[in-house]
Image (cartoon, rainbow, N blue to C red):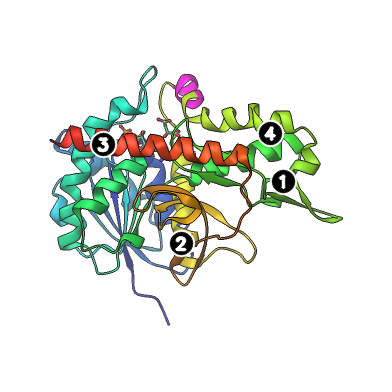
């Protein structure tokens, strides 16, 4: 039997991530090739004409799965009955800016949009915050939309996860899909900790650890980590714009795995509320290794954490605690 359409909200849809993301959703990359979608696109008044142009292009592309498009500058209309909300709207970091510089502009948007989502989205709507500072915007959204279950509010660190997979695959000259179980801990920022201690590669002789195959702990504990941490800044330097196609693709990966499940034996990284696992302050939106089944994520438990990892996991948690108080001071 044909599935009922799912309604997907993309905020900031006239921007560069939005432009890469909406055709992926309309093609079934996010929710699967048998799932019809209705797209709700929200942007602000100065971008209304450009947003309408994106709507025209979506119609012109004649996507078979696309059952409707709403382009609006009204948050209430945009949030109405949405099953999935991808929150991309906000101001991106430009060259020379630190993420904290975008904080004051963006957290107030997330406070305002929390109530529109809370009041008008479908029950059990799943929310993914992409706009930076992603973890703290998600935290503000969670705190100002208390009736949305906290397990439904997440932020994007899958891009960092995919970047870590990409770096390992380049280094070992193996296919990226043969590398698995890297973990991004913490904040989507330069304090994030990309951890390969449990990562493996499928080879013709079975599963081998990334540490064993790379054979260079010095590289893994220094250059690999900083390359992943600084990749967003490197893209901004090269493009004079922040990452867009990789961000859009990773957002699709995040939602697809959350809704349809992670493959057996594989985990991914998602920014989710901390329940105190691994000693991380409860309530923070922190990136953990998670598996997903039947539309629910769970944090992978029992991973051995050495002293090096502990220090890095605590440092990125500390930054998130500081961001939280900075965000509240911006909202005053
Ligand atoms: P962009 O400037 O091209 O697009 C942002 C869009 O948001 C614009 O069209 C703008 O008009 C719109 N917007 C601004 N305020 C809004 C509001 N209140 N409601 C709805 N829309 C609003 O930026 P971009 O390159 O698409 O990046 C979007 C965000 O994603 C930025 O904050 C960027 O830093 C972040 N980002 C996050 C990741 C991640 O991995 N988490 C990766 C890349 C970029
Ligand atoms: C990214 O990771 O590419 C984005 O979050 C851009 C940034 O500000 O680092």
Residue projecting furthest to the bottom: 1
Q: Which one is closest to the eye, mark 3 or mark 1? A: 3
Task: Name the residue that disc number 4 marks.
Answer: 220
Coordinates of residue 207 in the picture (x, y in percent) = 78, 55
Q: Which one is closest to the eye, mark 4 or mark 2? A: 4
Between the C-alphas of marks 3 and 1, the distance is 42 Å
Q: Does the magenta stretch include residue 172?
A: no
**Quadrant housing residue 247:** top left
Mark sitting on residue 325: 3
Task: Name the residue that disc number 1 marks.
Answer: 175
Q: What type of secondary structure mainly makes up the magenta span?
A: helix
Q: What element carries label 2?
A: helix
Coordinates of residue 171 in the picture (x, y in percent) = 73, 34
**What is the span of residues highlighted in magenta in the rendered image?**
234-239
Choose the circle earlier in sequence order: 3 or 4: 4
Between the C-alphas of marks 1 and 4, the distance is 18 Å
């Amino acid at each position: 039997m044909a599935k009922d359409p799912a309604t997907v909200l993309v905020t900031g849809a006239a921007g560069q991530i939005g432009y890469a993301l909406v055709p992926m959703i309309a093609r079934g990359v996010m929710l699967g090739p048998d799932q019809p979608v209705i797209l709700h696109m929200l942007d602000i008044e100065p971008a209304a004409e450009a947003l309408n142009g994106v709507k025209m292009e979506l119609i012109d592309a004649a996507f078979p799965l696309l059952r409707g498009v709403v382009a609006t500058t009204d948050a209430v209309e945009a949030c109405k009955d949405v099953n999935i909300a991808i929150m991309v709207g906000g101001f991106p970091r430009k060259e020379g800016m630190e993420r904290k510089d975008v904080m004051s502009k963006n957290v107030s948007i997330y406070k305002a949009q929390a109530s529109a989502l809370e009041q008008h989205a479908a029950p059990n709507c799943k929310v993914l915050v992409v706009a930076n500072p992603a973890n703290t915007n998600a935290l503000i959204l969670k705190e100002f939309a208390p009736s949305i279950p906290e397990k439904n509010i997440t932020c994007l660190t899958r891009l960092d996860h995919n970047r870590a997979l990409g770096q390992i695959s380049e280094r070992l000259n193996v296919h990226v899909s043969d590398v698995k179980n890297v973990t991004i801990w913490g904040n989507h920022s330069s304090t994030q900790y990309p951890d390969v201690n449990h990562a493996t590669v499928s080879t013709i002789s079975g599963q081998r650890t990334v540490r064993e195959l790379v054979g260079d702990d010095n590289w893994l504990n220094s250059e690999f980590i900083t390359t992943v941490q600084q990749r967003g800044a490197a893209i901004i330097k090269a493009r004079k714009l922040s990452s867009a196609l990789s961000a859009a693709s990773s957002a699709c990966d995040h939602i697809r795995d959350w809704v349809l499940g992670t493959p057996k034996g594989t985990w991914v990284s998602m920014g989710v509320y901390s329940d105190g696992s691994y000693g991380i302050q409860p309530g923070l939106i922190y990136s953990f290794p998670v598996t997903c089944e039947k539309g629910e994520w769970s944090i992978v438990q029992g991973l051995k954490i050495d002293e090096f990892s502990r220090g890095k996991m605590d440092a990125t948690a500390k930054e998130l605690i500081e961001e939280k108080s900075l965000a509240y001071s911006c909202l005053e």
